Amino acid sequence: MTKRWIVETNVDKTQTYPQLVEASNLIKENEVVAFPTETVYGLGANAKSDEAVEKIFKAKGRPSDNPLIVHISNEEQLDELVEEIPGSAQKLMKAYWPGPLTIIFKNKQGVLSERVTAGLDTVGIRMPDHPIALHLIEESGLPIAAPSANRSGKPSPTTAQHVLEDLEGRISGIVDGGETGVGVESTVVDCTREIPMILRPGGVTKEQLEQIAGQVLVDPSLKEGEGAPKSPGMKYAHYAPNAPLFLVEGDKKAIDELILEKQAEGLKVGVLTTEERKDDYQAECVIACGKREQLETVAHSLYETLRAFNKRDVDIIFSEVFPLEGVGLAIMNRLQKAAGYRYIKR
């Protein structure tokens, strides 16, 4: 049985909350507890304990060579975990911490569980911009390893109910702080390099990073979905709904033709589109995922939309594509993984 604590998001850091004390005590006892961040719900455990981190992998069914992000609540914790803080990292921390930005550092040997780093000499660390997350980390007194709180490969959770759908009975507890904000995971940027490199696009865009740190590269392996997993989510399929998903490069007519073809085969068709185009398609299940003119709304709704197709029991899903700029880069990264990089070009 997974315990559920409901906590209002406007917690006061000067106050003590029995629910968060109980949740933090479980973390100190090397149990796993899900909690909200500003991006998605995380599945947290003591990042220093092999026993605790192993429970994350077991609950998620996550491959063991996929590293985890470590969450901290203050910069003093960072000094204990990393060898050095490069100049580029210092600038980005000042601008975007707390916030949806994970920075890759050289890790200090013998502090974190090697299960967190997957044997690498680097570690991804972030300070979440969510009062419950910060309070929980502070209360535990520990760095908390926390990937998204879902079964591996499935859409990430943006509500406590999503977590329970995937992990009920597999974890000790969940702190229910309501719906998350950003909707896609943090941006991961490698600051161990001379020129910082984005390993995973997310809530902080390339353009925003460059305003602070100057030139920022994008890992070329993001296009092919290949390469050693230096960042969470780089190697394995993620975010996939139950039905096969295809990304369609083409106009409305191209998707209309695909709908008719699959309906003729007796399949129930789903279409992922936006508010501006939701009435354009004659499929059995058309779901609007935010507004095309406001891509941050698409990011916010993306995982909820992918999960919604599961409840509608569709046989195949066609998705529109989005521009590869701003938060659109993160949206397309998640959609490509959800689709297994399957494109239809017409």
Image (tube, rainbow, N blue to C red):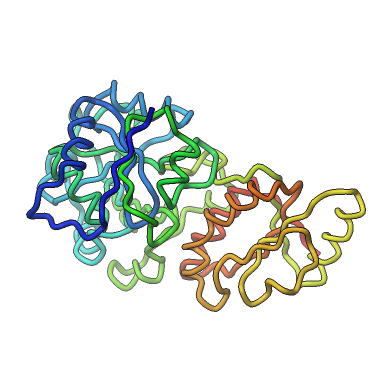
Q: Nearer the viewer, residue 210 or 342?
A: 342
Q: Residue at x 68, y 60 (%)?
A: 319
The N terminus sits in image quarter = top left
Q: Farthest residue in the left direction? A: 14
Hey, which quadrant is residue 242 in on the image? Answer: top right
On screen, 46 above or below 320? above
Instruction: Please provide percent x and percent y for residue 294.
Output: 50, 75
Q: Residue at x 29, y 42 (%)?
A: 5
Query: Is residue 326 among the parts visible in the rendering?
Result: yes
Q: Residue at x 39, y 57 (%)?
A: 179
Query: Is residue 82 among the parts visible in the rendering?
Result: no
Question: In the figure, is residue 252 to the left or right of 64?
Answer: right
Instruction: Please provide percent x and percent y for residue 303.
Output: 52, 54
Q: Farthest residue in the right direction? A: 264
Question: In the figure, is residue 241 to the left or right of 51?
Answer: right
Q: Nearer the viewer, residue 64 or 173?
A: 173
On screen, 185 above or below 300? above
